[in-house]
Amino acid sequence: MKPILLIENWKLGIKKNTFLSFVRKEFRHIFRDTWTMVILLLLPVLMLILFGYAITTEVKNSKIAIFDPSKDVATEAIIRKLAASQYFSVVKMLNSQTEIDETFKKGGINLIVVFNENFNENMMHTGTAQVQLIADGSDPNSAKTIVGYASNIIAAYQQEIFKINNIPYQINPEVKLLYNPQLKGAYNFVPGVMGMILMLICAMMTSISIAREKEMGTMEILLVSPMKPIYIILSKAAPYFVLSLVNLTTILVLSVFMLGVPIAGSFVSLIVLSLVYIFVSLALGLLISSIVNSQLVALLISGMVLMLPVIMLSGLMFPIENMPVFFQWISQIIPAKWYIIGVKNIMIKGLGFSSIINELLVLGAMAVVLIGVSLKKFKIRLE
């Protein structure tokens, strides 16, 4: 029995050693692949941080402007309460009502509070006073929330006055929503969906397509052709550029005729902005493909580096001003953020080319930098 037992133990030991050798081999394979390690260890951290800090339905630090022709104790008290609230930041005092439209067109202001003349005097003599809350309705969810916060603060001041004087004063907020008075949700999500789809088609599909050639070993075959490597790479990206134009046309047709979202501004400006954004997205795809050799890694990096920031940090779903300062800075380098702002200015607000110059300059600079880095990487790896 002893020899049989020894043989069984020996076989068991061999199996155990074989299993451990396979486990060690797999660990070495994982550790050898830097991008796999980054995805396995860094992606959960990034997702937890992004979802923990970016997902919030609260709207904080909204920038508001005030037009106060009365300048009495009542209006000053309400302004102080608005400024003291965590939800608002008073950044501008207007001198006339003619500045209201121009202020919204310049951007950066979410709400304008307009007091009527002789506000305190009317309240004391007639028991009522009027205040107008004018919000940017291009983002209906934020607009409703901001108006609700401001109305509650005004109602709280009204209650304080009632407790002091025991007189039922009435301060009646009149709400006006610019650009989207019916609060259609399509006005908000169509620009964001445009940015996300174009990024998905251009960047993700381009990076996967080129990585597929590397993974299958056919890239070397392409490189022995008379064409230069740069033309081969651009030829791989060209179909996705055409597909993006088709998608852009489809989105615009559906947005206008099915969802009822108008192109209130310059159509030519919208096309120019979209073309620049497509170039940026293609450059991102080329950059990803230049640093990876696997379709799976290209897909995961595209999802981690492109899709998550587009959804979380571009203003597509959550207001950027609600986020910590660090993420607000990160959002500045998200191309989709600038594209969404430009599309809203043109389609929803009806502004012209001058309203998107800043966005065009930022996206143009991104395109130049990304294409330059991508081409340099490809020359080093492929020539």
Image (cartoon, rainbow, N blue to C red):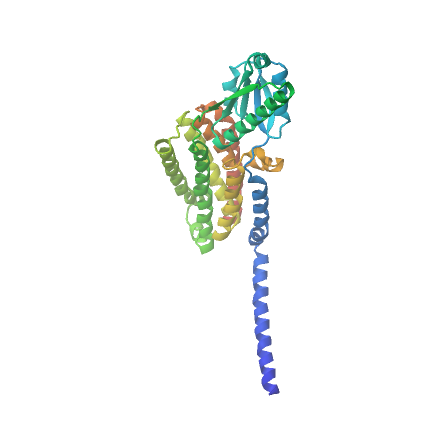
Residue at (56% x, 67% y) in the render = 22
The percent position of residue 299, horizontal first and vertical second, equals 48, 49
Compare residues 231 and 174 and report the one nearer the observer: 174
Q: Position of residue 298 (x, y in %)?
A: 49, 49
Question: Outermost residue toward the bottom?
Answer: 1
For image coordinates 56% across by 38% down, the residue present is: 56
Q: Which of 46 and 151 lies nearest the eye of the viewer? A: 151
Q: Residue at the left extreme? A: 257
Asked whether 144 or 19 is in front, the reply is 144
Quick check: 352 above or below 8? Answer: above
Residue 245 against residue 160 in the figure, above or below = below
Name the side, left or right, on which 75 lies relative to 253: right
State the image coordinates of residue 306 (x, y, percent, origin top left): 51, 42
Residue 181: image quadrant is top left
Residue 383 visible in the displayed image: no
Instruction: Answer whether residue 89 is visible to the viewer in this image.
Output: yes
- Residue 250: image location, x then y, percent: 36, 36
Residue reaching furthest to the front = 166
The mark total stands at 0
The foreground one among 325 and 177 is: 177
- For the N terminus, the image quarter is bottom right
Q: Is residue 35 above or below residue 82?
A: below
